[in-house]
Amino acid sequence: MPRPPKLASFPAIRGALTFYQICSIITGIGLLLLVTEMILKYTPIHVELFLGGSGGFLWFADAIAGPGCQWFSLFIPGGDGCEMISTGDGVNVSLAILVAHGWFYVVYLISCFRVWSLMRWPFRRFVFLALGGVVPFLSFILEVRTARGVRAYLAEREAALASAPVPAPEGNR
C-alpha cells in the first residue's frame, strides 16, 4: 500500500492539480476537434479545413481518396489503409489540429504524472489518467472526478491534523 502524501507537499499538489485541470480541458477540446477532423476526412464526406489560400478565410477542400480506396479502408484491422490526397492550398487546419493535439498530449501526460506522483497513487491510476487524452470526453470526466477527490482528500487530512492533540513542550512539566 503506498504511503500517503506528505503534508509539506500539499501546496505542490494544489498547484499540480490546477495545472492538470487546465491541461485536461485543453486536451479534451483538442481531442474532440481531432475526432471531428477525422470524421470529416475519412468518412465519405472527404473534406479538410483550410485557412487562407484560394478558398477564402476558412474553407473546406476535398480530400481525394487514393486509387482502390474505400471509405472504410483505414478501419480494417491489418489493412493497408489508403492515401488521402489533399486538394486545398493555404494552412491545413486539420493537420494543425492533429499536430497541436499530439504535442499538447505530451504536456497533459506531464501534468498527469505530476499529480499522480505527488498523490502517490498506484500506477494503474496514472494509466487511467493518461487515457483521458485519447478517449473522447474522458478527460472532462476525469478532470472533475480527480479534482473533487484530491481536494476532498487534502481537506480531510488537514482537518484530521488540525483536530489532533498538540503534545505539551518538554520544559513545562
Image (spheres, helix red, strand yellow):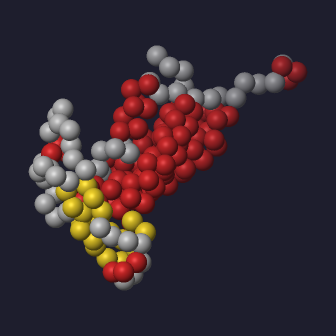
Could you tell me which residue is drawn at 42 percent across and 60 percent down?
Answer: 96
Relative image position of residue 74 (x, y in whole percent): 19, 45
Q: As displayed, is residue 116 above or below residue 20?
A: above
Q: Which residue is farthest right? A: 171
Taking the image as shown, residue 38 lies to the left or right of residue 114, namely left
> Residue lying farthest top?
1
Answer with the quarter of the image where residue 76 lies: top left
Q: Is residue 140 visible?
A: yes
Q: Is residue 155 visible?
A: no
The residue closer to the viewer here, 10 or 50, is 50
Relative image position of residue 168 (x, y in whole percent): 76, 25
Q: Is residue 133 or residue 141 the one in the foreground?
A: 133
Where residue 39 appears, as percent x and y from the top left, is 21, 58
Question: Along the horizontal axis of the image, is 47 left or right of 4?
Answer: left
Identify the residue at horizontal 70%, vertical 29% (top origin).
166
Q: Please, is residue 22 above or below residue 173 in the view?
A: below
Q: Residue visible at 29% across and 67% down? A: 87
Instruction: Tell which of 44 and 107 is nearer to you.
Output: 44
Query: Which quarter of the rendered picture does the C terminus lie within?
Result: top right
Residue sitting at the far front: 67
Q: How many marks can you see?
A: 0
Above or below for 71 versus 132: below
Q: Determine the residue positioned at 64% across, 35% down.
A: 9
Task: Give the image location of residue 118, x and y in percent.
Answer: 57, 33
